Image (cartoon, helix red, strand yellow):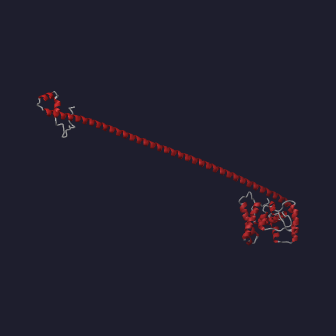
Amino acid sequence: MKRKKWSELEEQTLLSKYSDLLNSGALAKLKTREKKFKPVADHVNSLHHLHDPITFPFKWSWRDVSIKVQNMRHQYLGVKQKIRVSKDQFNWKDGENHWENFLKYKEVFGDVELDPKAKRMTDCVDVFGDCGDLGFGIDSEDSDEEEEEEAEGVGSEGEKEIGRLGSIGAQVLELRDAMMRREERRREREFRKEKEAEFRKEKRRSEREEWLENRESELEERQLTWARREFEKRVRLERELMEERKWRKRIEEKMEEEEMEWRERMVALQVEHEKQMMQMHADACQNQMQILGIMARLLCQFFGSTSDGLGGGLGALPPQVLQNLQHTDGLGDNGKPDANSPSEFI
């Protein structure tokens, strides 16, 4: 059966949830370990295993959480021993190089003092590498009874020492697993970093593509706007040209109408002028005829119709002329001849 192993993300979730319960006061109201750690286990499973069972294949029980909390305490002590500079001085920043959640554990559970009796054994174990994840607890359900006995303080100090010496052999065998787990955690961190870098790269690529698409859309929109404006401008110019042609045509028609009217007026004036000239000519002829008629009457009255000399002189005229000279019915009261009388005299 594959050994269960916590990932650093699951450890962070465990510490965060435990801190929330502790700060809210809910943890103090829970009396049993099951009631204390079951909400934490459910929270870790809901965020990791249920969401991504491939990356986080293990579903944790409240016993697993209880054991993990105790093992993290041993892991914290192991890392603290490593970063110890002097008796009371520690390089806290270096703690995260050994365990990523080192400062997070210190923030939630507080600092844990080093056990002077365990220093010799810790130094002995440290030669094989970072065994902080083991401490003196075994990350399995089989060690739950041992952890529970240790937590409740059952047994004397001497029995604990004997148990610890007896478990050195098993712990030494666990050192190799601890080193392998440490290497696996390092690889997981590198894998997560690669995933994050790949995600950021993909995000930048998506943003770049989106920016290019938006740019292309803006260019297309600008081209459409420019084409629409050009079309509207061309239509407006054509409409203006058509209106100008219509205006010019109206002006030309108006000018032609005025010219025709002017010509008609000139023709009418010319006809009227000719009529007046003809009337004047006719009046002049009529006046001449009236004068000649008056002179003929005067001559006839002056000389008398019985005078031989005059009769001989007038006898030479044609009979019709004499008749016209003696005819007085063609003159009006004012001495003008009738306009309807024929002009036989002419």
Say above or below: 312 vs 107. Answer: above
On the image, the x and y values in percent for residue 240 come to 49, 45
Q: Outermost residue toward the left?
A: 306
State which quadrant residue 50 falls in.
bottom right
Counting every numbered tag in the picture gives: 0
On the image, the x and y values in percent for residue 256 come to 40, 40
Q: Give left or right: position of 149 versus 30.
A: right
Residue located 86% across and 61% down the image? 126
Decide which of 283, 197 is in the foreground and name it. 283
Q: Give left or right: position of 306 versus 31.
A: left
Decide which of 321, 159 is in the foreground and name it. 321
Q: In which quarter of the image is the N terminus?
A: bottom right
Residue located 29% across and 38% down the image? 276
Say above or below: 89 vs 283. Answer: below
Decide which of 236, 253 is in the foreground and name it. 253
On the image, the x and y values in percent for residue 294 come to 18, 35
Q: Give left or right: position of 273 versus 62.
A: left
Residue 38 visible to an observer of this rendering: no
